[in-house]
Image (tube, helix red, strand yellow):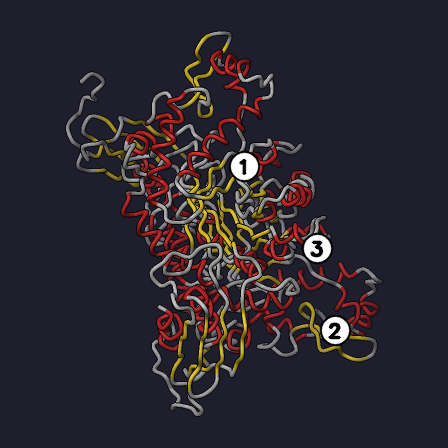
Amino acid sequence: RYYEYMFGHSWRRTWGRRPLAARAEPELFQLQVVIEAGDPGCDRHPHLASSEAYHLTVTEPVAVLKAYEVWGALRGLETFSQLVHEDDYGSFLVNESEINDFPRFAHRGVLLDTSRHYLPLKSILTNLDAMAFNKFNVLHWHIVDDQSFPYQSIYFPELSDKGAYSSNLIYTPTDVRLVIEYARLRGIRVIPEFDTPGHTQSWGKGQKDLLTPCYNGGQLTGSFGPVNPVWNTTYDFMTKFFKEISSVFPDEFIHLGGDEVDFSCWKSNPEVKEFMKKQRFGTDYAKLESYYVQNIVDIVSSYNKGQMVWQEVFDHKAQLKPDTVVQVWKASNYAHELSSVTGAGFTTVLSAPWYLDYISYGQDWKKYYSVEPLNFPGSEKQKKLVIGGEACLWGEFVDATNLTPRLWPRASAVGERLWSSSNVTNLEDAYKRLTNHRCRML
Amino acid sequence: AENEPSWETPCSELLVYVSTPGCDGFPSLDSKESYKLSVSNGSMLLSAETVWGALRGLETFSQLIGRDENGTYYINETEIVDFPRFPHRGLLLDTSRHYLPLRAILETLDVMAYNKFNVFHWHIVDDPSFPYESSTFPELSKQGAFNAMTHVYTASDVRTVIEHARLRGIRVIAEFDTPGHTLSWGPGAPGLLTPCYMGKAPSGVYGPINPIVNSTYQFVTSLFQEVSTVFPDFFLHLGGDEVDFTCWKSNPEISAFMKEMGFGEDYKKLESFYIQRLLHIVSSLGKGYIVWQEVFDNDVKLRPDTIIHVWKEDFMQYLNEMANVTRAGYRALLSAPWYLNRISYGQDWIAAYKVEPLNFAGSPEQKALVMGGEACMWGEYVDVTNLTPRLW
């Protein structure tokens, strides 16, 4: 595909003109790609500790791209393709270069939300291409939420039967496999998020007795709240459900969500209140939330999967596994949150300043570019726990008709911030390169 | 099953009756766009005075058609008498900040028709680029376009836009904004723009059109002669916004002229001097004109049939401006609360929808001077990759 990227979109060909110039000297005949590890990883999936470093030497007659693992070779191939340019006569040129490159942060992600609006496969795949152009390596797939449940589950087909917007707005097992493989070929991990116990309205359509029934003055209102944490059946369901998820998604991590749990329904429910008493949680419903989350963490751990959670799970003091990744998303005083999370010894991923769904007029890419993730009070050891960040494109106002122009090239600013060295901060220089990069991506 | 609609005899024909069609003409500000639509037992009738009304009715008719689970197309029994509240319902596209390929413009015209817009305000040239291929002054686009081969509108392109619009009952009002917003005119028209001075010497930078030399007015006359022929609508938009006086102030010849004319330090008088001559030129070409509000705000002497385009949005002051403009007896167009290029998070359509253009203190006669308004999609951050989802 890189051959096509470099030579297939010749502007001369676009305008119907044949290449003019004779072959120029000196000529670059070949790009040799050398992968040094015994097991290059070509048949595996990328993971957090994958090596993405590469060494690129461009000189005549043969350029050499060396990387330890295939993932570094992919990054180097992307860079090489960006170095190749076309002159006014239709010749393809590349400058003699020596590049030694590796990412600053290992977790560089984009969050897509396919619940608020369904995103057809094509949108997701196009987005994976764009991510690869920007050296992103994680697709955080926020696949289900309150509004719809498009994930077609094998064990629980009713979830999407009743919970999807419609029968054709779903992701079949084949669709999911396609996304995972398409991503893998670009060195992108797919981390699915099945957000509970809040954000689960759509789950209740296809799974009776999962969500908490709400009460008003002792009477059932007919509406439902978060997942019911007091019934055993909840955990039976989650055990089976996450067994499936663990086998469908090969990444070592699953995102469990855990954000914005509204306690009012729990507070109204007599069984829940009874449970609170028995557990001696008093009126602290955060304790109930933590009780629930801890159970899910145990379930998911038993399938040998690591967990990512939104910051509330940490804030509400749930007991987490030491390798849990806490995702910081609340914008107000996120530096303080980073201090707390890393201070408690957890690895963290930053999203708070990178909610790209919050559009505004003008060159907002500058504010995304200017974020310095390690700008928080903390020791060197703490700062090492920041493994990266994610640009989030929540779907309330996004579907296939506007996803690409809304996300790109603004997300490119985040991509560079996460890959490049901390001293690459000059906005004028970034502007020049970003405008070129945008045209190249088009 | 209960609640099944009783299907009447299938209707196979929509009869369209138009009393004075005018199919070969162009729509105008005075065009009648009213229509009647009657759908009943096996008969569907759309009647209108002009073809423009018929087009509006056809759009409505197309929106009334539903399709059930079996694939049957149906339409409810309907009786509609409809006409627009405002005769000027426009959309502004900016093809200077970013070039928009023809297909983007034509597609926009299609969607305008779905929404009964009837004016395409083509802000065709500005500071960043001059994509309009002029037959009188070919150097303007040769030197001023982003790319003289690929980023221009040929005479044929312009004709295509005008005809595509006409077939949808949409007027095309071209804006050649002067004397400010003209940097791209400079390279192709040497001597047109004011040379700015740094102390005693020219700085190499240029400002607005030079209002004190005769060559300017010769140029403007020739250009607008061409523009008046190319664009059939009665109205031309002459711009006149955001004229920066700093360059004029720096130029010694202009300072001398100011003294000669007794304008003192009031450069608004110089701006008026230019605009008045421009308006005179355009009138003698038999065209009416629309100008941005500064022209009114700066006390330029205007013809009574000038239309003032209100665009400044400072803390809801635009309603005051609408009152002032109409009190002075001029017709007004509202755009201030409808700068759709100023995107923000969430359902911003609501703020646009809530605007009440006549919400200002004034007599009924004043309010009758409000011709309508325009949604503006300025192009600083817009090109073909994001125009459609940003605008609609």
Please tell me which residue is depicted at 62% across the width and 74% down the height of the picture.
B186
Marks 1 and 2, how far apart in space? 67 Å
Q: Which residue is mark 3?
A: B300
Residue A157 to residue A393: above or below: above
Q: Earlier in the sequence, mark 3 or mark 2?
A: 2
**The quadrant where residue B320 appears:** top right
**In the image: residue B265, left or right of residue A10:** right
Q: Amino acid at mark 1?
A: Leu
Q: Which residue is mark 1?
A: A320
- Please give the chain letter of the residue carrying mark 2: B
In the rendered image, residue A300, in percent from the top left (x then y), is placed at 42, 37
In the rendered image, residue B265, in percent from the top left (x then y), is placed at 83, 62
Classed neighbour count for the residue bearing mark 3: other residues with Cα under 10 Å, few (<14), some (14–19), many (≥20): some
Q: Quadrant of the N terminus of chain B?
A: top left
Mark 1 lies on a secondary structure that is: loop
Residue B220 to residue B61: above or below: below
Q: Nearer the viewer, residue A375 or A69?
A: A69
**The quadrant where residue A207 appears:** top left
In the rendered image, residue A370, in percent from the top left (x then y), is placed at 65, 56
Q: What is the number of the mark on residue A363?
A: none
Mark 3 lies on a secondary structure that is: loop
